[in-house]
Image (cartoon, grey):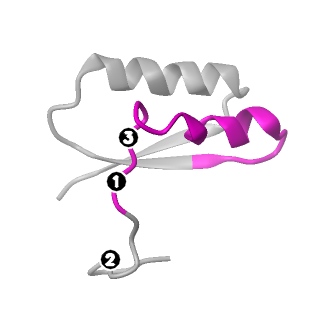
Amino acid sequence: MAGYGAENQHESVSFFQAPFFQAPLCATKKLNVIAALLLGSWNTTVAKRIASIDHDTDERISVNAVSG
């Protein structure tokens, strides 16, 4: 886990460029995912995508909204 400074933090992963993000949730029954979103000018498509993943995986995705 990366702490302050995030030396080990992975690059941002887009919900649209990484369809594999949803696959582990659909293939398992207990895996939960927390997506951290840096607040900014997110469009409604991101919210719709997260809502779809949440619905498809029986509410096993959470969103953590963070500020810079």
Indicate the amino acid at tag 1.
Ser
What is the x, y in percent for residue 46?
35, 26
**Mark 1 vs mark 2, CA separation in Å:** 12 Å
- Quarter holding the C terminus? bottom left
Side of 63 where 6 appears, left or right: left
**Residue 40 within the segment the image draws in magenta:** no
Is mark 1 in CB contact (under 8 Å) with mark 3?
A: yes
Q: What residue is shown with label 1? A: 12
| Badge 2 density bin: few <14, some 14–19, many ≥20, Cα 10 Å | few
**Mark 3 vs mark 2, CA separation in Å:** 18 Å
Q: Secondary structure at mark 2?
A: loop
Magenta residues: mostly which secondary structure? loop
| Badge 3 density bin: few <14, some 14–19, many ≥20, Cα 10 Å | few
Q: What residue is shown with label 2? A: 6
Q: Tell me the magenta residue range.
A: 11-33
**Residue at coordinates 67% horizontally, 30% vertically from top-left?**
59
Indicate the amino acid at tag 3.
Ser
In this view, 34 is above or below 26? below
In this view, 12 is above or below 55? below
The image quarter containing residue 56 is top right
